[in-house]
Image: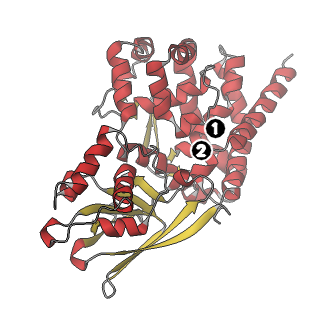
Amino acid sequence: MNSPRLTPIEVKIKIHPDHIKRFPDPNGKGRNRYIAQVSVDEIARANIEFGPNPRNQNLETKVSQAIAEGLTVRRGWFMYFNRGIVLNAETAEYDNQTQEFKLKLLCDTKNPWESTYGNLDGGHTNKVILKAIKDGWKNFATAGDKQFVTLEVLLGIEEGMLSDLVGARNTNISVKDLSIIVLKGDIDWLQEVFKKNKVNDKISWRQFENSEVNGIDVIATLSLLNPRLEVKTRCYNGPGRIISELKSNSEVMKGLRSVQNIAFEYLKFVDYIHDSFEGWYKQAERKKISGFGNLAGISMSETELIFLKKVIRYKILKSWLLPLAFSFTRVVMDSPDDPKLWRTVADTVGPKLYAMLREQTSSFGFNLDKLAKSSAVWNALEALVWAEYMTQKLANV
């Protein structure tokens, strides 16, 4: 089921058959993509000004001005000077006879730039084209001078992977900011904790490093404990902004550093949640133990839990894992010296957490991205954990 705010939109783009190609998923996971060379006039006609693109389109920047110059001055070269536009679509079909590329998209009418479908990357390119044509610029008449742009359309993308994909496709300023923080020594204290526990070499802290775990993900998870970060859902949908704040705001960095003494144990506990989840599923479902791999928030791919030092056969997507990790933060801060108690509470309440996540996922129409941005879901999970924690504390008085 789709959210009532999601409006179906059909887009038709004229493309010559020689200028479009479909690529099946070489991994056999049902994903597909089209690559096309599209006239900028067709992009303007499509008028797709919505999607999960995380950046506002500021046309006053040097980047935007360079895009505009490439469009209006460098005749016949725009497609080669520009990275292009990437769309996430629900369905796509090309008709060789009509030469029409038909896309079905869904637009969140309340928050267009939080739509699951639409512009993933290339928001500035799209906006520059729209503005230029609206302001009276016309594509060059001579065939050799006409401006085209590369269009990539993705299909079958898991919603729980959407934020990662968007972050990777967009200019990753958060990676650069993290590299700067590391270079300045601002998180030497955290790296020392990880070096002491022999996991630091498994974390990518600088741009272009390729380790098992991304440093941005580590800090986003640890930031769930940061008392200076009020809106914890940002750890899911705004980790890049958190990294930027750590770079520029000493109070936010101070808040993160305040959890230094429990940083490793908490991240190890999050791995414990990850490792325990299949067991929680089996306890809750009992008769349906064969369907674990079909759960919306689960990807059946081998995952190394570096803090727990264990490899498991599946991965919990961030849209489920971060709300689960958050649900225990109040317990962790109330009993910071008792990781054993955290696990005891988790072992007891875990099946109920799974059941609540499953129910909430269904109520959100299996839109994992919307689920993970809902503070109500996070708070409901936290309340469930806190109730079990208090029950156990009272029983031991």
Q: Nearer the viewer, residue 335 or 114?
A: 114
Q: Is mark 1 on a helix, strand or loop?
A: helix
Q: Mark 1 points at which residue?
A: 324
Name the residue beneath numbered marker 2.
320
Please, what is the three-letter code of the amino acid marked with disc 2? Answer: Trp
- Asked whether disc 1 touches disc 2, contact meaning CB atoms under 8 Å apart, the reply is yes
Q: Which residue is drawn at 61% across and 42% down?
A: 277
Choose between 3 and 308: the one closer to the eye: 3
Q: Where is residue 199 in the image (x, y as percent from the top left)?
A: 40, 23
Q: In this view, does 86 lie to the left or right of 308?
A: left
Height in image: 270 above or below 185? below
The colour scheme is secondary structure
The quadrant in which the C terminus is found is: top right
Amino acid type assigned to the residue bearing label 1 in the image = Leu
x and y, in percent, of residue 143 in the image: 15, 72
Quadrant of res 44: bottom left
